[in-house]
Image (tube, rainbow, N blue to C red):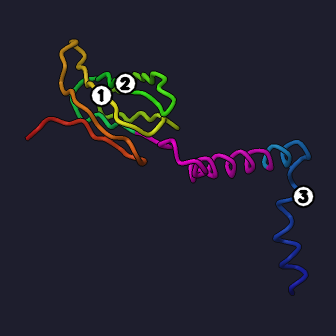
């Protein structure tokens, strides 16, 4: 009985052609590598924020701009366009104090200020209630 069960379990493996089997293995490898990227590898020097994400809960797209300096006094500037109900992320930005600006689709400034980025964060942009 156990032999028949094992044969039935292995039967789907024999129905694949060699190229289908290789494609399945490659797809599994891509999936595993992608998940390990999402898990993240902590930087040994801890000089970077691995992930800064911005969620837009406004009714129209926004532009999120940050500007600052890294430890070596190099300028760091990043701009992101985020659709309404969308989310965009930056990966591995230097830790530090940045000025930020949220610009609406009509080019008006919605918010402006400074923020210290020292750990992974998700910022939600929404109307003040």
Residue for badge 1: 99
Looking at the rendered image, the quarter that the C terminus falls into is top left
Picture coordinates of residue 99 (x, y %)?
Answer: 30, 28
* Location of mark 3 (residue): 14
- Residue 119: % across, % down: 42, 48
N-terminal of the pair, mark 2 or mark 3, is 3
Q: Position of residue 66 (x, y in %)?
A: 35, 26
Q: Which residues are magenta?
A: 25-52
Count residues near mark 3 (Cα–Cα under 10 Å), then give few for <14, some for 14-19, many for 20+.
few
- Decide which of 68, 27 is in the foreground and name it: 68
In the picture, which quadrant includes the N terminus? bottom right
Mark 2 Cα-neighbour bin, 10 Å: few <14, some 14–19, many ≥20: some
Is there CB contact under 8 Å for labels 1 and 2?
yes
**Is residue 43 rendered magenta in the image?**
yes
Determine contact: label 2, label 3, CB under 8 Å.
Answer: no
Closer to us: mark 3 or mark 1? Answer: 1
According to the image, label 2 marks what residue? 67
How far apart are the alpha carbons under marks 1 and 2?
5 Å
Q: Residue furthest front?
A: 72
Give the residue furthest to the left.
129
**Residue 81, x across and y down, in percent:** 37, 22
Pointer 1 local density, CA inside 10 Å: few below 14, some 14–19, many at least 20: some
Judging depth in this view, the residue of 31 and 66 nearest the camera is 66
Residue depicted at 80% across the width and 50% down the height: 25
- Whichever of labels 3 and 1 marks the residue nearer the N terminus, that label is 3
Asked if the magenta segment contains residue 55, the reply would be no
Say whether disc 1 or disc 2 marks the residue closer to the N-terminus: 2
| Element type at mark 2 | strand
């Amino acid at each position: 009985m156990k032999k028949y069960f094992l044969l039935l379990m292995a039967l789907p493996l024999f129905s694949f052609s060699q190229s289908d089997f290789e494609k399945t293995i490659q797809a599994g490898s891509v999936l595993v590598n992608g998940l390990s990227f999402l898990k993240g590898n902590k930087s040994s020097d801890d000089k970077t924020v691995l992930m800064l994400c911005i969620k837009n809960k406004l009714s129209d797209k926004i532009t999120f701009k940050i500007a600052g300096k890294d430890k070596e006094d190099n300028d760091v500037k990043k701009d992101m366009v985020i659709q309404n109900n969308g989310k965009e992320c930056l990966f591995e930005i230097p830790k530090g104090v940045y000025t930020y600006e949220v610009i609406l689709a009509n080019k008006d400034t919605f918010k402006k200020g400074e923020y210290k980025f020292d750990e992974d964060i998700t910022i939600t942009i929404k109307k003040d209630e």
